[in-house]
Structure formats: C-alpha cells, structure tokens
Image: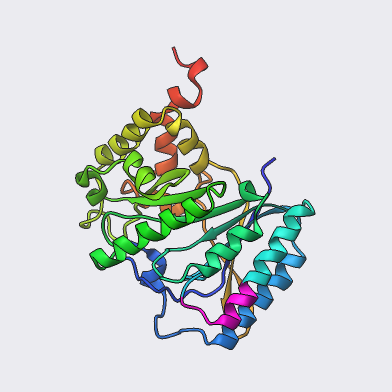
Amino acid sequence: MIPPINEFILWANCTNKCKFCLQNLKADHRCVLSEDEKLSSIQKTYEKLSDLPYGDILLIGGEICGGVSKKVAESLLSLIEFCRERIESGLIRYLYLNTNLLYKNLDIIYDICSLFSGYEDHLRLTTSYDVYGRFSSIKDKKLFFDNASAITSRYPEQPLIVNTILTHQYYTSGITVRDIVEKTGARSVVLVPYIPVKYGDEMTPTPDEIFDSIENAESEYPGYIRKYVDNFDLKQDRTLWEYHSNIDSLEMCESPLASCGHNSNFARVLGGKCFVCELKKRYKRYINPDTVS
C-alpha cells in the first residue's frame, strides 16, 4: 500500500509568475508574506509534521529556496533537517522539494543536499525547465542551466528531477527529453501535461502533439511510458495544506477528484476526457504487455 502524501504550500507568492501556472493566476500577488509570517508558516508546518503518520512530504512555494532572509533560510533548513531525522526514524519515506532555480545564491540548496548525504534517494529535488512561459530572458534561461549543472556536478549522488510542461511550444521546438537531461544533468525528466485555463489557447497542444512527445521519450528511454503512466495513475491519498497569514494557521485545501478517481484538472488537458484514463487506454501494451495479443 502506498503511504499518503502531505503537501505544504509554505508561502504562495511566486518569484517568477510562469504563464502556464494555475497557482500564479489565482494568487494575490499583493499579498507577500513578511519575514515573521514566513517564520510562522515554517513553525506551523513543523508542528503539523510532528503529528503525521508515516508517509511522503512535499514542501513548495512560491519559491522557498531563493530570495529569503538569512533568518528564514535558517528556519527552513531546520525544518528540512527535522524531515531528514524523521526519514532516519522511518516516519517519512520521501521528501519532495520544488524550486525554480532562478536565483544566484545556491547556499540553501547546497545545505539541503549536504543534509541528505547518505539519504539522497529519499530527497526528491525537483525543478522545472520549459520552452515557453517560464523564462523572461535569455539571462534567466542561462541562470537556470548553470544552477542545475552546478548542483548535479557538486552532488552527483543527489537525483535532480526536471518537470517540463508539455505545451504546443514544447512540441514545435523539437527539443527532446534527452536534450534536457544532457543540459541539466537530471536523473529524470517528466513531461507534465499542460492544464489550460481555456482549452485551445496558444499553449494548448493537440492530442497528437501530446502523445507524439511521450512516444518520442519512449524511443529515447525505453520503459519511459510505463513509468510515466504509473506515476500519473498513482493511487496515493493527498492532503494539501496552505498557510494563511490572516489567521496565522495552516488550512486544508480541497483537490477535487473526478468520478474516475483522478484529479478533475486532468479533464482539461484533452478538452474533456481524463488525460490519465486516456493514457491507460492508449498505452495498455506498455503497462501490461503480457495481456496484449
């Protein structure tokens, strides 16, 4: 049985405002947490973590590893060290950390990787590379690649996971999963389906573009599709927590499921049909090869 995952949005204010990000669209960018509020969010998360049963943990922003004060950085590292201790004690399976790597000072990332020396497989360090909608300049793109390469060179035992939003622009660029691996040193690249606010906008790929991209990844890395489908079809109980400064408390957020059991947002990928259900139908031969004639 797969253990549950508790996801914590420590602070929602993002430093990048990607065009494809649903959280960016719904966030109130006028509401930027103060240093004291960020410290309170970390403390509330620590308290909640202390009471949780065995499972996975995700810490996310906004951006939590760049652009924070020394005091917030120290508090965040204490929280992450606490997570590492719970891993040692068998109370956490994986710690997921998401970061955009669009900042110059990597000290927090380096400290995190050092904390997980010997426990690298329990840290899912995740970032994002996107052909369109993420980088506001060539300078930003270079900073991202320089940072990713610096991390994977300095900590070769620490897996880096790169998410890439599967937009129309990704498909037409001709870039491949292998290209991203070679440029970043990533252990794996996940083609994340684009969830449009309005189906058919400039970033929406056609179904053929989506499936061609996934099948191209399979041709580069045999076995990619099976892992890909398993990942999105994962039956894992999820609880999302977000800190609200007006009440100085963590509040549980709803993540509605469709009748098929998958997140309702997946129906927006293909304009009505559940993306994960369609994956399972289309790629049955990869998932259960022994049952396909």
Percent from the top left, x then y, of residue 96? Answer: 57, 56
Q: Is residue 163 visible?
A: yes
Numbered disc total: 0
Percent from the top left, x then y, of residue 157? Answer: 57, 46
- Colouring mode (rainbow / by chain / secondary structure / one colour): rainbow
Q: Is residue 250 visible?
A: no
- Which is more toward the observer, 45 or 270? 45
Percent from the top left, x then y, of residue 134? Answer: 31, 63
- Which is more toward the observer, 222 or 243? 222
Whether residue 178 is in magenta: the answer is no
Q: Quadrant of residue 75?
A: bottom right
Name of the residue lying farthest toward the front: 154
In the picture, measured across the screen, residue 247 lies left or right of residue 221, that is right
Q: Quadrant of residue 281?
A: top left
Q: Residue at (21%, 47%) from the top-left corner?
A: 173
- Quarter of the figure with the N terminus: top right
Q: Quadrant of residue 142?
A: bottom left
Q: Residue at (56%, 42%) from the top-left corner?
A: 234
Percent from the top left, x then y, of residue 107? Answer: 53, 69
In the picture, measured across the screen, residue 281 lies left or right of residue 37, that is left
Whether residue 71 is in magenta: the answer is yes
Q: Residue at (80%, 54%) from the top-left corner?
A: 89
Secondary structure, magenta segment, majority class: helix
The residues colored magenta run 67-76
Name of the residue lying farthest toward the right: 89
